[in-house]
Image: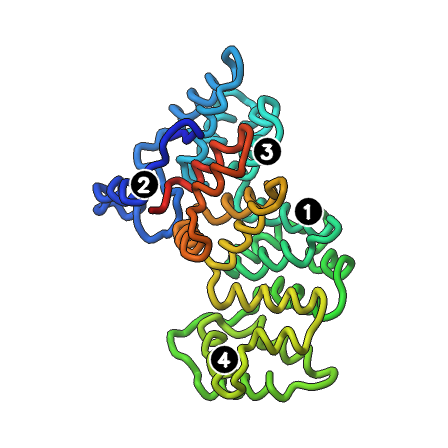
Amino acid sequence: MSVSCGKTAPSLIQEILSYLGLANKTAAWGTLGTLRTFLSFTAEKDVQRLLRAITGQGVDHNAIVAVLTNRSREQRQLISRAFQERTQQDLLKSLQAALSGNLEKIVVGLLQPTAQFDAQELRRALKASGSAEDVAMEILATRPSSRLQECMTIYKHDFQVEAEEDIKSETSGILQDLLLALAKGGRESYSGIIDYNLAEQDVQALQQAEGPSTERTWVLIFTQRNPEHLIRVFDQYQQYTGQELEEAVRIRFHGDTQVALLSLASVIRNTPLYFAEKLHQALQETEPNYQVLMRILISRCETDLLSIRTEFKKKFGKSLYSSLQDAVKGDCQSALLALCRAEDI
């Protein structure tokens, strides 16, 4: 369904009720994403609708948004293949020729495979001035290991250079060490059991780390331990020292290193809140930071955007949907609202 500024947003209750009839459909559950598999999906029908949208008199933006923001990424890939078979043309290139601006960027992001989208966002960040640490940390710290490794493979294929080499050339110091460690995807998986002895050892190591060993110790623990273990470490650190671990970071580290460690701690403590805060910051700028809004909504709409919406409303007292509706202008508004999906009451 296409969502435009002239329509009343569906409430959260209405959204939940709309899914109750899908209880016997596995595809409808197991996700906190706002964009789910479309159960009445037919690739050929979607191809016909998209063809009408771009070949008629004037481009039908609403039809394009309605299709692409209501299909899972896997379904969008099937549409792309069906479009190629029917027209002998590339769907992405055809839509790029018909669109422009931020709506074009959103469509490109929706039609790319997940790992390719991440690889291009990472490359853009590393080659842009002033955003490398923020965006690189977001991508490297929040993607599952399997998706991250696929991203690294595509990065090398598309740009003819290892992502690690770009990280080395664009960053330095402990920030570089953090990003390189995260890029390896070596974080331990959670076994379901907290090792309290190891947690205590990590707390002591963080407390005692001084001099050159400080950075190595913090990088190792922050990038290798699983989040469940690290939450325990954070709690014990505060119990033993009377100080939140984030406050210790502010005292011990400075500049980009401090920002990176605080961002990583935020991801570990509450990933949806981390994204909610980034979205809020992007919306508070004089001109909304569309790149941030698009990247987060596209990358999280099939995983945990419902949780992000909840954290946004809880912390800022206003729904993400309403915030987007108030701040975002132009053709891309309907697409971003459609990915957000509904109002939170």
Query: Up-down: is 334 above or below 265?
Result: above
Identify residue for label 2: 11
When asked about the image quadrant of residue 95, the answer is top right
Going by the numbered disc 1, the residue's amino acid type is Arg
| Residue pictured at 65% horizontal, 65% vertical | 259
Residue depth check, mark 1 versus mark 3: number of the one nearer the observer: 3
Q: CA distance from mark 1 to mark 4?
A: 34 Å
Q: CA distance from mark 2 to mark 3?
A: 26 Å
- Expressed as whole percent of the image width and height from the top left, the position of residue 99 reads 58, 25
Mark 1 vs mark 3: which is more N-terminal? 3
Residue depth check, mark 2 versus mark 1: number of the one nearer the observer: 2
Mark 2 vs mark 4: which is more N-terminal? 2
Q: Is residue 77 visible?
A: no
Q: CA distance from mark 3 to mark 4?
A: 42 Å
Identify residue for label 1: 124
Relative horizontal placement of residue 345, taking residue 200 as reference (left or right): left
Q: Mark 2 near mark 3, Cβ–Cβ under 8 Å?
A: no
| Residue pictured at 68% horizontal, 50% vertical | 125
Toward the top, the furthest residue is: 57
**Which color scheme does this rendered protein use?**
rainbow
Q: Tell me the crowding category of disc 4: few under 14, some 14 to 19, or many 20 or more residues within 10 angstroms, Cα based.
A: many
Q: Mark 1 near mark 3, Cβ–Cβ under 8 Å?
A: no
Q: Tell me the crowding category of disc 3: few under 14, some 14 to 19, or many 20 or more residues within 10 angstroms, Cα based.
A: some
Mark 1 vs mark 4: which is more N-terminal? 1
Q: Quadrant of the N terminus?
A: top left
Mark 2 vs mark 3: which is more N-terminal? 2
Relative horizontal placement of residue 153, taking residue 53 as reference (left or right): right
The label shown at residue 233 is 4
Identify the secondary structure beneath mark 4: helix
Residue depth check, mark 2 versus mark 4: number of the one nearer the observer: 2
